[in-house]
Image (cartoon, rainbow, N blue to C red):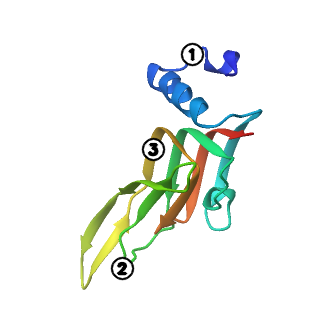
Amino acid sequence: MITDIWKNATPEQLLLWKIAKSKVAYNSITEMSFIGAIAGSEFETYAANKLYIALQVIFATSAGASLTNSYVSLYNEANAFVLALSNSSINYNAAHYYNPCNMIIPNIWFSKIFVSGYSTMQFTGYKLLP
């Protein structure tokens, strides 16, 4: 743990760190701040030896409606599906459209994500590598 950064961590963040560091025998921990397009990012690619500890992740989409519900799927270090999150509202007009809302997820860990309906992501946290 990087003590000077984690000294003001919340109890939830300390618990998250304790669980995450037991999942990967790491040699390298890299602070990460990412804002950009999800498509083609390293977060969509699975690698057994990487784990992300997110203090906060925000998923957003461009303006406009889509015909599909927006969701985020999280995978663990074994590339097994762990959790699916969805956040949408319906606008009633000529047709029923899903209007995706931003999704803000604090204090979570994952190895890979799959995103549908969201186009951009803001990640603040750490990447652990062996």
Secondary structure state at the residue bearing disc 2: loop
Relative height, residue 40 to residue 49 (above, below): below
Circle 1 sits on which residue?
A: 8
Disc 2 and disc 1: Cα gap in Å? 43 Å
Disc 3 and disc 2: Cα gap in Å? 24 Å
Q: Callout 3: few (<14), some (14-19), or many (20+) C-alpha neighbours within 10 Å?
A: some
On screen, residue 103 versus residue 58, left or right, reads: left
Disc 3 and disc 1: Cα gap in Å? 19 Å
| Residues marked 3 and 1 touching at CB (< 8 Å) | no
On screen, residue 92 versus residue 21, left or right, reads: left
Picture coordinates of residue 36 (x, y %)? 65, 57
Relative height, residue 100 to residue 122 (above, below): below
Circle 3 sits on which residue?
A: 105
In the rendered image, the residue lying farthest to the bottom is 94
- Sequence-wise, the earlier of marks 3 and 1 is 1
* Foreground residue among 93 and 96: 96
Report the amino acid beneath label 1.
Asn
Relative height, residue 10 to residue 35 (above, below): above
Residue 129 falls in image quadrant: top right
Picture coordinates of residue 47 (x, y %)? 67, 55
Q: Callout 2: few (<14), some (14-19), or many (20+) C-alpha neighbours within 10 Å?
A: few
Report the amino acid beneath label 3.
Ile
Q: Residue at x 39, y 56 (%)?
A: 84
- Sequence-wise, the earlier of marks 3 and 2 is 2
Q: Quadrant of the N terminus?
A: top right
Q: Callout 1: few (<14), some (14-19), or many (20+) C-alpha neighbours within 10 Å?
A: few
* Foreground residue among 76 and 85: 76
Circle 2 sits on which residue?
A: 67
Picture coordinates of residue 22 (x, y %)? 58, 30
